[in-house]
């Protein structure tokens, strides 16, 4: 299968060849990986790019005399989506991760408690999300490796403190992120940007909505901030609205859960396949095993928009919660 690479890929490839430093080479390679379409024809090329990224990152670390703090930002993705929490100091990112996951980030009332990323797994219905607590970002300083972590994540959650200038928090965070060429999905991209941007699925988490008065303040925040990003109120301290936050993460992730079963058997409803929204039966089959697409004759599906056991073909679009019986 041909790779069918777009023109932007070759522009990034040219920047890679012309790059003088390992870090510049890493940036160009990551752009190539982001731009490259995902299909079987690019599998080998993607693997080769990942090897080169690893190689030049190692060179960049050696050149800088990098230590543990830099390598701590290489967090392997787990679960249905990796959600990186970003924001100014003392907005409650660590408290949220502690309330939602099995992680134990250091939590304190003073700023800059978190000095390295801390991942944890948050259960939501029959799947898990990986939440990552991170050091604060502001106009004064951003750890150089933070950009790499955010660029690689599936979802960016901007955390603001309702009681301490949430509008300023959101504005400053978006400004800092734009300086790293990271933009929430759906927001305007500066026309004079010299390198391709990193577009991230995003949401705004408004923390410390602890009282009825705070809920009213949250409504005022929504009216004043005029953002198109999805917003969610939470209270890490009182553990309020935490399930609403996870539900919003599921929505923003743009994924569906599909279950499979063998003929005459029951499905395991605790082990869904995670697929992008609008995925087809063929895409499900390829995720199960590469030979399934070639061998698949037909399938039957049980779900909301079909009658029980309806026969479907490879181009059938699956829905969240569908149970699929594959026949090969």
Image: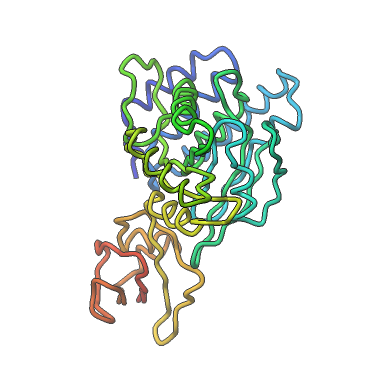
Instruction: Report if residue 184 is visible in the image.
Output: yes
Residue 240, image x and y in percent?
Answer: 52, 56
Residues 190 and 40: in front is 190
Instruction: Classify residue 2 as left or right of residue 158.
Output: left
Percent x, y of residue 231: 40, 44
Q: Residue at x 32, y 57 (%)?
A: 279
Image color mode: rainbow
The residue that appears at 45% across and 57% down in the rendered structure is: 244
Q: Is residue 228 above or below residue 209?
A: above
Is residue 328 in view?
no
Q: Quadrant of residue 295?
A: bottom left
The correct choice, above or below, for 129 with respect to 319 in the image is above
User: Residue 316, position in %: x, y?
Assistant: 25, 64
- Residue 218 in which image quadrant: top left
Identify the image quadrant of the C terminus: bottom left
Residue at the front extreme of this rendering: 213
Viewer-proximal residue among 104 and 69? 104
Nearer to me, 218 or 184? 218
Q: Where is residue 83 shown, x and y percent of the image?
A: 52, 45
The number of discs equals 0
The image quadrant where one finds the N terminus is top left
Residue at 44 percent across and 30 percent down: it is: 167
Depicted 15 relative to depicted 248: above or below: above
């Amino acid at each position: 299968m041909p790779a069918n690479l777009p023109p932007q890929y070759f522009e990034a490839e040219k920047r890679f060849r012309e790059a003088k430093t390992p870090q510049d080479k890493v940036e160009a390679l990551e752009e190539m990986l982001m731009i490259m379409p995902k299909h079987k024809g690019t599998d080998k090329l993607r693997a080769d790019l990942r090897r080169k990224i690893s190689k030049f990152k190692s060179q960049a670390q050696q050149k800088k005399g990098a230590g543990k703090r830099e390598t701590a930002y290489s967090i392997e993705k787990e679960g249905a989506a990796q959600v990186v929490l970003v924001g100014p100091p003392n907005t409650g990112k660590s408290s949220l991760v502690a309330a939602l996951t099995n992680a134990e980030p250091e939590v304190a009332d003073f700023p800059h408690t978190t000095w390295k990323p801390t991942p944890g797994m948050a259960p939501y219905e029959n799947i898990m999300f990986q939440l990552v607590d991170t050091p604060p970002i502001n106009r004064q300083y951003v750890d150089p490796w933070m950009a790499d972590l955010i660029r690689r994540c599936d979802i960016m959650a901007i955390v603001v403190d309702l009681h301490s200038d949430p509008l300023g928090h959101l504005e400053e965070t978006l400004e800092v992120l734009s300086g790293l060429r990271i933009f929430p999905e759906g927001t305007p991209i500066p026309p004079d940007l010299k390198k391709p941007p990193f577009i991230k699925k995003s949401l705004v988490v408004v923390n410390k909505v602890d009282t009825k008065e705070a809920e009213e303040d949250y409504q005022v925040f929504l009216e004043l901030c005029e953002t198109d990003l999805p917003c969610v109120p939470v209270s890490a301290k009182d553990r309020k609205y935490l399930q609403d936050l996870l539900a919003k993460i599921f929505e923003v992730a743009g994924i569906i859960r599909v279950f499979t079963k063998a003929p005459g058997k029951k499905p395991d409803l605790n082990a869904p396949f995670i697929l992008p929204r609008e995925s087809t039966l063929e895409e499900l089959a390829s995720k199960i095993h590469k030979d399934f697409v070639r061998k698949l004759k037909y399938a039957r599906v049980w779900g909301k928009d079909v009658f029980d056991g309806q026969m479907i073909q490879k181009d059938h679009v699956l829905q969240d919660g569908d149970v699929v019986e594959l026949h090969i």
